[in-house]
Image (cartoon, rainbow, N blue to C red):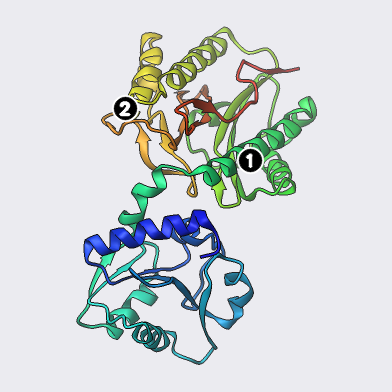
Amino acid sequence: MKDSAFASRVGKINEILKQEGIDCFLVTPSSDMKYLCGYSIKGDERFLALVLAPDHEPFIIANILYELQVTETPVTEFTYWFDGEDPFSLLKTELEKRGIRPKTIAVDAAMPALFTLQLNALYPDARFVNGSPLVQPLRVYKDRQEMDRMIESTAKADIALKRCMDKGTYWVGKTESDFLAELAYEMTCLGLTAPGACVAVGANAAVPHHNTGDTVIEMGKCLLIDFGGSYKNYCTDMTRTYHFGEPSDKFKEVYHVVLEANLAGEEAAKVGNQLQDVDIAARKVIEKAGYGDYFIHRTGHGIGIDCHEGPSAGAGETTLIRPGMAFSCEPGIYLPGEFGVRIEDQVLIEEDGTTRVLHQLPKELTIIK
């Protein structure tokens, strides 16, 4: 392979395949394929796969329509098929050319049944296994290239939200969807792909996964924005909660409790601690303030190629925090019918063990007047 980072990942997977007695691993467009060769085009009904086999050079089999995209990957061997041809027979031929007659075949978890059924028919005596669990442990610990891309991704997200919030009271009278559209535009301009957000006004912010709609932004109401996108295949995920007009004393109290919990969680995000320690630290602050019943989700989740990856910063997660890990810290308090507050940062554990909070937008209560 042409890229040393991808070659290293593929090399590790091939060693695992050898240890597990797996003859080949077929990876269709998915998060795993992004990780192993950087290919990020969405899959369709045409069979396309990265083919890995121990002691063999990886190759991609693809419809000729995708020739220009697959040749941009670090893979150096390709096999193309045309509409009307049978890609599965071609795959078998290519494997036999390489002396590969698989008895055990791994496929990625995202592979459509449309393909797995035909592969089963092609190799009726083979054993098929889920290959994604072999990749997941490697994806937990980001290499330098991955870390740098996450740093870039989060920096762009900060800029996008700042550009929107700098408009201040312009947003009064606009809807959640109006804000989402502007934020998505700003993210796109900065090179973030697949932009998305949960934009929630007032009582809607008490619904952690509110579906952004036509609720109007008003003075006297909070605005919660949980958003992100992807840059060079790596995700950003952050949340900030603002208030239009002077907030009530209760809102101020809740906001400062959540902020204290966020800071406590990030303080616990240290090499050697367990991931659950992040959750324990944040939850303790909220419970002490009397709002424990209103913090209804884990404190964080792993993040990388997928916005939500494992393992989580939640109760019972004893995985040790180690260099290369990236996860969110996002405590929240949700008061049904009133309002909700969530403050979320992305945390990265650097190669030297330093804990780095990637988002730099201020977290102190910001009042828009």
Which numbered disc covers residue 272?
Answer: none
Mark closer to the chain start, 2 or 1: 1
Report how many numbered discs are placed on residues in the image: 2
Q: Which residue is mark 2?
A: 274
- In the image, residue 151 lies at what x, y percent? 59, 37
Residue nearest the observer in this picture, 172 or 348 = 348
Element at badge 1? helix
Residue at 28% of width from left, 79% of height from top? 120
Q: State the image quarter where residue 179 is shown.
A: top right
* x 49%, y 57%: residue: 6
Q: Nearer the viewer, residue 248 or 3?
A: 3
On the picture, is 358 further left or further right than 268?
A: right
> For the residue carrying disc 2, how many other residues have a C-alpha within 10 Å: few (<14), some (14-19), or many (20+)?
many
Kind of residue sitting beneath label 2: Gln
Rounded to the nearest whole Å, what is the CA distance between mark 2 and mark 1?
27 Å
Quarter in which the C terminus is drawn: top right
Using the rendered image of the protein, determine whether residue 198 is visible from the camera's viewpoint. no
Would you place residue 353 above or below residue 28 in this image? above
Q: In percent of the image, x 41 and y 9: which residue is there?
A: 289
Nearest the eye: 346 or 241 = 346
Q: Give the labeled residue for mark 1.
A: 152
Residue 202 horizontal/vertical position (percent): 59, 26
Position of residue 47 relative to residue 294, above or below, is below
